[in-house]
Amino acid sequence: QVELVESGGGSVQSGGSLKLSCDASRFTASANWMGWFRQAPGKDREGVAATYVGSPSTFYGASVKGRFTISQDNTKNTMYLQMTNLKPEDTALYYCARGVSMAAIQALDPKMYDYWGQGTQVTVSS
C-alpha cells in the first residue's frame, strides 16, 4: 500500500509560520526524490520545494525561496516544510509527492511525480 500523509496545515496571519509534515512511513515503494507542491483554487499545481532523501540537496520555487525550508528526518521517514513570513498568496492546498527521478526535484514539475498525498490546507489572512 502506497501512502503519503500530510499534516500541519492551518490558518495564520500574514507574517506567521507553519510547519508541514509528510509521513512516508507506510510508503512501500522507494522514495528517493520527494517534493512539496501547492494548488490554489483556479490555479495550476505549483512546485514549492524538493529534496533528494539522505542528501542536503534542495530546490525551491522562486516564490518561496528564502522563506520556506524543506527538510527530512530519515529515522522517522518524514519530510517537512517549514514556512515562514507567510503571505496571503501562499494560501493553497499543500501536497507532498514522490518524484520519479533526480530531474523531478530539479524541475519541480508535478508531471514528474507519481504518488501524491491528500493534501493539507494552508490559509494566510492579511
Image: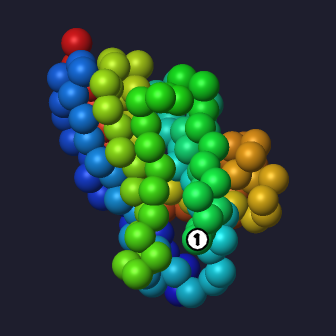
Q: Nearer the viewer, residue 7 or 107?
A: 107
Q: Secondary structure at mark 1?
A: loop
Q: Is residue 108 left or right of residue 62?
A: right
What residue type is disc 1 on?
Answer: Gly
The residue under the point 43% across, 37% down is 68
* Count of labels in the image: 1
Which residue of the protein is positioned furthest toward the front in this rendering? 56
User: Please, is residue 124 above or below residue 46 in the view?
Assistant: above
Graded by Cα atoms within 10 Å as few (under 14), some (14 to 19) or many (20 or more), the crowding at tag 1 reads few
Q: Quadrant of the C terminus?
A: top left
Q: Is residue 45 among the parts visible in the rendering?
A: no
Q: Nearer the viewer, residue 33 or 40?
A: 33
The residue under the point 61% across, 49% down is 58
User: Please, is residue 48 above or below residue 118 in the view?
Assistant: above
Give residue 62's position: percent from left, percent from top: 60, 25
Give residue 54's position: percent from left, percent from top: 58, 71
Per the image, the residue denoted by label 1 is: 54
